[in-house]
Image: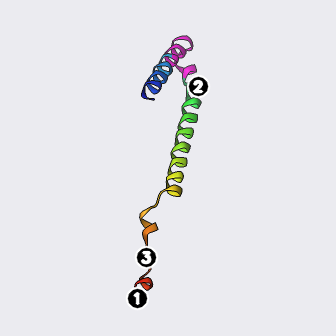
Amino acid sequence: MKAVRRFGFLIGVLVIGIIIGNFGSLIAFLILGPLLILWLILWDDQRLRQKKYQQEHFLTESDYSYSEDAYR
């Protein structure tokens, strides 16, 4: 999986270089800015989904609470 991520990163860097080389920095920012914002939004959404999944499927410390009446 690491190799796929590294390959994707390498391709991304090369594409960014091609865009900057062909169009200039201003147009590159206009193209890459929204893509970067979209990537950050999707990444944050994935982290939120993972956190919700962990809370639903794994016990937390508050799940081990007890009532003092049960021990009387």
In three-dimensional space, the C-alpha distance between marks 2 and 1, rounded to whole angstroms, equals 69 Å
* Residue 10 coordinates in the image, percent (x, y): 45, 20
The earlier-in-sequence mark between 2 and 3 is 2
Q: Nearer the viewer, mark 1 or mark 3?
A: 1
| Three-letter residue code for mark 2 | Leu
Magenta stretch, residue numbers: 15-28
* Residue 44 coordinates in the image, percent (x, y): 52, 43
Q: Secondary structure at mark 2?
A: helix
Say which residue label 3 marks: 66
The earlier-in-sequence mark between 2 and 1 is 2
Look at 43% across and 76% down and name the residue there.
66
Q: Secondary structure at mark 3?
A: loop
Say which residue label 1 marks: 72
In three-dimensional space, the C-alpha distance between marks 1 and 3, rounded to whole angstroms, equals 12 Å
Q: Residue furthest front?
A: 71
**Residue contact at pointers 2 and 1, CB within 8 angstroms:** no
Q: Which mark is residue 30?
A: 2
Q: Residue furthest top?
A: 22
Q: Is residue 46 magenta?
A: no
Secondary structure, magenta segment, majority class: helix
Where the C terminus falls, by quadrant?
bottom left
